[in-house]
Image: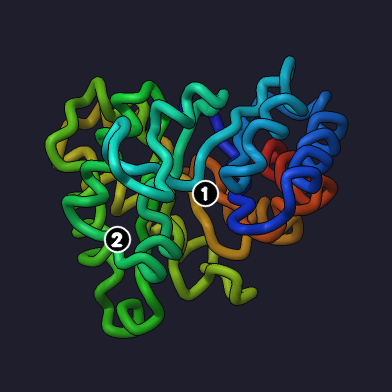
Amino acid sequence: MRRLLLAGNWKMNGLPADGAALARGLAQRLIDAPAVDIAVFPPFLSIPGVVAALKGTSIVVGGQDLHPAASGAHTGNTSGEMLKAAGCGSVLVGHSERRSDEGEAGEFLAQKTRAGLRAGLQVIFCCGETLEERDANRTLSVVRGQLADGLSGLTPTELERIVIAYEPVWAIGTGKVASPQQAQDVHAAIRSWVGQTWDAGTARAMRILYGGSVKPGNAAGILSQPDIDGALVGGASLDAASFDGIVRAQAQEA
């Protein structure tokens, strides 16, 4: 049975004091949370304060990105080893905003995936299509291609520390959301691809999250689908009450 995972991506929001305050609010609200895995991804500068605020809880802190190298002349970048030393247990790779803003793709993302695993981090690998690609009926080919680029060459054992997040670009920050059936169809296709690329056991164990304007009001319907194992939440994770509402709505469907 796949354990549900709810991850909050705070993106480039909040000063360090704001991040610590939000983390304290989450710790208080989620003290009696249902049995699901919870992770938050604050901006880099907020990580130390968030780690301190969540000490003694089961909430995992993660980085929003990492550089493929462990160290070196890479001004402005952060390695997986640095994230691990700061108290992180997870990292995002391939988020659509990194793909669009920074032009990340292909082998570079595969290097980042391997770097996260090398540092001992769980990797949440993101994939998803634009509205133009969906309208052209290219959703599955785009998603499979992104996954093949980012996860190729990994062993089933390495995949145990990989989580896939399907985030249709057209539903991120737009207020639009895929219907439960639309989301389920893509998640099922991803699981099938994992099974064909590796094996059925790996596919059954793989956790696949949905991301795209998830809120307390729509979480239960989306996340009740059989192949959806949690959510990568954006804006709604910046409010402790809202994030708590999603956790509890999701758990009711578990």
Which residue is depicted at the point 48% across and 44% down? Answer: 226
**Residue 41 in sight here:** yes
Q: Secondary structure at mark 2?
A: loop
Q: Secondary structure at mark 1?
A: loop
Q: Which mark is residue 158?
A: none
Q: Nearer the viewer, residue 75 or 33?
A: 75
Lower sequence index among marks 2 and 1:
2
Please identify the quadrant where the C terminus is shown: top right
In the image, residue 223 above or below residue 145:
above
Residue 99's spot in the image, x, y percent? 35, 64
In the image, residue 157 above or below residue 223:
above
In the image, residue 87 above or below residue 228:
above
Amino acid type, residue under disc 2 in the picture: Glu
Residue 253's spot in the image, x, y percent? 65, 40
Which residue is depicted at the point 39% across and 52% down? Answer: 126
Q: Which mark is residue 104?
A: 2
Q: Residues within 10 Å of mark 1 (few under 14, many from 20)?
A: some
Residue 176's spot in the image, x, y percent? 59, 75
- Say whether marks 2 and 1 touch (CB < 8 Å): no
Q: Which mark is residue 225?
A: 1
Q: State the CA–CA distance, disc 2 to disc 1.
A: 30 Å
Amino acid type, residue under disc 1 in the picture: Gln
Which residue is depicted at the point 19% across and 56% down? Answer: 106
Q: Nearer the viewer, mark 2 or mark 1?
A: 2
| 198 displayed left or right of 12 | left
In the image, residue 11 above or below residue 179:
above
Q: Residues within 10 Å of mark 2 (few under 14, many from 20)?
A: some
Residue 96's spot in the image, x, y percent? 41, 63
* Figure quadrant of residue 122: top left
Q: Nearer the viewer, residue 139 or 101?
A: 101
